[in-house]
Image (spheres, rainbow, N blue to C red):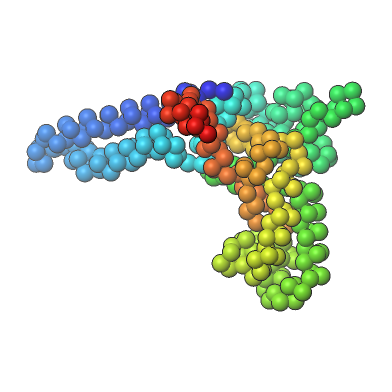
Amino acid sequence: MVPYTETETYKYWLMRAEADLRQLSERRAIAEKISKRLRTPDQQDDFVKIPSKLKKLSERINDLKDLTISPAERCYVLSEVDGTKWTTEELRLNAEPLANNEGFGEKSLKKKYDLPTDCSSETCDLIKHVDGVRVLYEEVKCIEGKNGVLQHIQTGTHGRAAWGAWLLKFVKSETYKKINDEHLLKMLTGEHLQEVFNSDASPLPVDVRGDLFGSLSPSKILGDYDAVHATHSKGHIRVPREDCEKAWELDGVTKAGPAYRLKLSYVDARLRASLPATNDMIDVAAKQ
């Protein structure tokens, strides 16, 4: 593991932003020294537009230093910190068309763990036995959608079964009779149920909503695996079973079952943990 501030990706972003800031500052300074009537159209354009560009670059530099860069960028850097950035060969495999039920990055991870790279019908993506003992039981889920936007993950058969079991219990309850037809239709057809999870708009009583959250908690669904590999275009993040509750949050329910989103607080904590301990951090730890 390397400190995130020492990764090639992070250093490149910071170096590029600082170089652009210097270059634009120099161009702005030149334009300022020339009176308006003597400026060329390009110099006048620099005089007018560069200040807003400088502001954006300064914000970018501060975001990098404060670790408030975009969610996808934080995941890219974490993969480099962990040494799970895709290799050239893995990028080639990832570019191949996906088979039915195959997750992005699945071929690369199967090759890494010395597993057959063909897509199987198993309920788990990465399964390995040694002398009849299961030593690997890990899942592959893509967390990056179009244009680098992080997306929720679906959970397949196990998650759908848990949602179905809760729904069956719910329709037999007295609360079921009090829910209006519009909400019932959404629940029974499996539309994305944000209003069920929003405490202000939810039609469900607090105790029923709490039971739903408990039945579909990350540890109960994603905790079925030894680990989940959250894949993205630059690499993957391995989230072990013991980190389930810290790493994932229930994001809703769709036709494919419960959906979970990777918490940025978890990504940030792992990034900050990569930094060398300062004297202040050592003093705080000693007092605890």
Front one among 171 and 79: 171
Name the residue: 66% across, 69% down.
205
- Pinpoint residue 277: horizontal percent, then vertical percent: 48, 25
- The quarter holding residue 146 reads top right
Residue furthest front in the image: 287
Residue 254: tell me if it is visible: no
Is 39 situated left or right of 119 in this image?
left
Name the residue: 67% across, 63% down.
209
- Pinpoint residue 152: horizontal percent, then vertical percent: 63, 48
Front one among 213 and 37: 213
Front one among 87 and 72: 72
- The quarter holding residue 117 reads top right
Name the residue: 43% across, 25% down.
279
- Total residue callouts: 0
Residue 277: tell me if it is visible: yes
Q: Is residue 185 above or below residue 118?
A: below
- The quarter holding residue 66 reads top left
Residue furthest right in the image: 132
Is 85 situated left or right of 39 in this image?
right
- Pinpoint residue 128: horizontal percent, then vertical percent: 82, 28
Name the residue: 53% across, 34% down.
288
Give the position of the N terminus as an image quadrant: top right
